[in-house]
């Protein structure tokens, strides 16, 4: 039962991480926050991929060609021969913390000072050091034994506690950045989204003490415990940043977000059902689920981007503009309920520009003025 639960939770986490990452970069392609958050989510997706490959290792190929390793750049070459222990050690979550810390600094009001830049560079330096130690020395993990369903499978090396403490420090710094940004925000809607991101950071940070307790006291916590915490954090971060970017850009995503999630979810369910039948009927390895899940989300998330890029080759200039306007109109369908939120953002900008103490927008209905934003 634990095996099936761990597989399901990690598959959900992988799907959320990959989809939300592509959702952010396709809807806010010029936003540095969107790109850095997507890198954060994709790094967490790599951790889910580790666990799924360890629980469902691919069959060992005979006379594997050297080019096959190009598809597994983050795993040791022995992974295709040794089985699940090598798959479990392929990807570190530390780069995700560095990317997220960078996001929280970019969100801070004001310019990028030397102190802020130094902290960003320190985060990436720690990530590179962790990757080097992991790949080339036994100082991160000294050995692998036991059951991949539990956290005690990986035996910590001498530097593992150090990296855990550094990880916790960057989680705390990210949380402080978000709290300070929320306090300086003049708009209630932005403060709400920043509160969601703070909660997500706190939830993700719980992974560190759980790991420390498990390794220190040799308590066999199920690995799915961390997976659930990270999946909750991924969902909150993905939606929170998408909402934050939309508010900053003066648009709404509520209906578009649900529509996109329903579309990807429906298509993914169909593909996974076909894959399940193929596994049962033709004895295809279980690892097929992982690759089908990932590729379906990536390809279908990029359909609109590819279609927009190909317009240049197949349509005249006036038709390209018309098709772009139609896409924008499609995203705005059903967004009337968010009129008050858009007016609140506009009013906030106007009041800030003229140093107004108070502002109000009234919508006249017959002889009655209804407050739409204050």
Image (cartoon, helix red, strand yellow):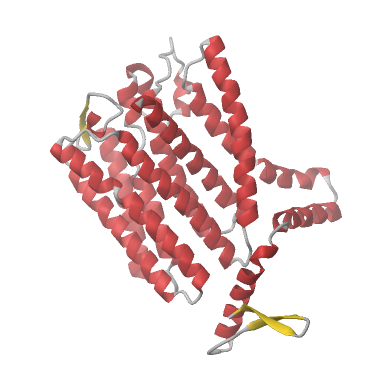
Q: Find residue 305 and report its horizontal and vertical position in percent.
A: 67, 46
Q: Is residue 124 visible?
A: no
Could you say which is closer to the camera, residue 197 or residue 127?
197
The quarter holding residue 273 reads top right
Could you say which is closer to the camera, residue 44 or residue 221?
221
The quarter holding residue 121 reads bottom left
Report the residue at 44% width, 64% height from top. 194
**Image check: 76 left or right of 159?**
right
Report the residue at 33% width, 65% height from top. 176
Quick one: quadrant of the C terminus?
A: bottom right
Q: Find residue 159 and report its horizontal and vertical position in percent.
A: 18, 42
Identify whether 240 is placed above or below 314.
Answer: below
Could you say which is closer to the camera, residue 265 or residue 145?
265
**Image check: 238 left or right of 203?**
right
Quick one: quadrant of the N terminus?
A: top left
**Image check: 342 left or right of 315?**
left
């Amino acid at each position: 039962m634990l095996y099936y639960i761990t597989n399901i939770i990690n598959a959900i986490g992988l799907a959320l991480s990959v989809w939300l990452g592509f959702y952010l970069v396709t809807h806010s392609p010029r936003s540095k926050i969107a790109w850095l958050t997507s890198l954060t989510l994709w790094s967490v997706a790599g951790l889910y991929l580790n666990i799924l490959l360890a629980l469902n290792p691919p069959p060992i190929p005979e006379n594997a060609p050297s080019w096959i390793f190009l598809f597994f750049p983050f795993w040791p070459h022995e992974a295709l021969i040794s089985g699940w222990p090598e798959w479990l050690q392929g990807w570190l979550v530390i780069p995700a913390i560095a990317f997220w810390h960078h996001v929280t600094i970019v969100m801070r009001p004001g310019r990028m000072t030397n102190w802020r830049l130094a902290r960003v560079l320190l985060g990436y330096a720690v990530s590179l050091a962790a990757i080097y130690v992991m790949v080339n020395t036994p100082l991160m993990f000294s050995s692998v034994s036991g059951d991949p369903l539990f956290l005690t499978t990986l035996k910590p090396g001498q530097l593992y506690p150090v990296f855990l403490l550094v990880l916790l420090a960057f989680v705390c710094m990210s949380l402080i950045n978000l709290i300070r940004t929320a306090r300086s925000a003049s708009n209630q809607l932005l403060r709400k989204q920043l509160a969601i991101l703070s909660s997500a950071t706190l939830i993700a940070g719980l992974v560190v003490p759980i790991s420390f307790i498990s390794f220190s006291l040799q308590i066999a916590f199920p690995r799915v415990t961390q997976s659930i915490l990270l999946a909750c954090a991924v969902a909150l971060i993905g939606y929170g940043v998408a909402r934050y970017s939309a508010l900053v850009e003066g648009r709404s995503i509520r209906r578009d977000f649900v529509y996109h999630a329903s579309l990807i979810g429906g298509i993914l369910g169909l593909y996974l059902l076909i894959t399940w039948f193929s596994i049962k009927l033709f004895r295809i390895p279980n690892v097929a689920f992982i690759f089908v899940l990932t590729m379906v989300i990536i390809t279908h998330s990029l359909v609109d981007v590819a279609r927009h890029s190909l317009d240049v080759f197949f349509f005249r200039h006036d038709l390209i503009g018309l098709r772009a306007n139609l896409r924008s109109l499609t995203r705005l369908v059903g967004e009337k309920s968010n009129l008050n939120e858009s007016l609140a953002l506009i009013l906030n900008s106007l009041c800030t520009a003229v140093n107004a103490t108070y502002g109000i927008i009234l919508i006249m209905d017959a002889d009655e003025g209804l407050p739409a934003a204050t």
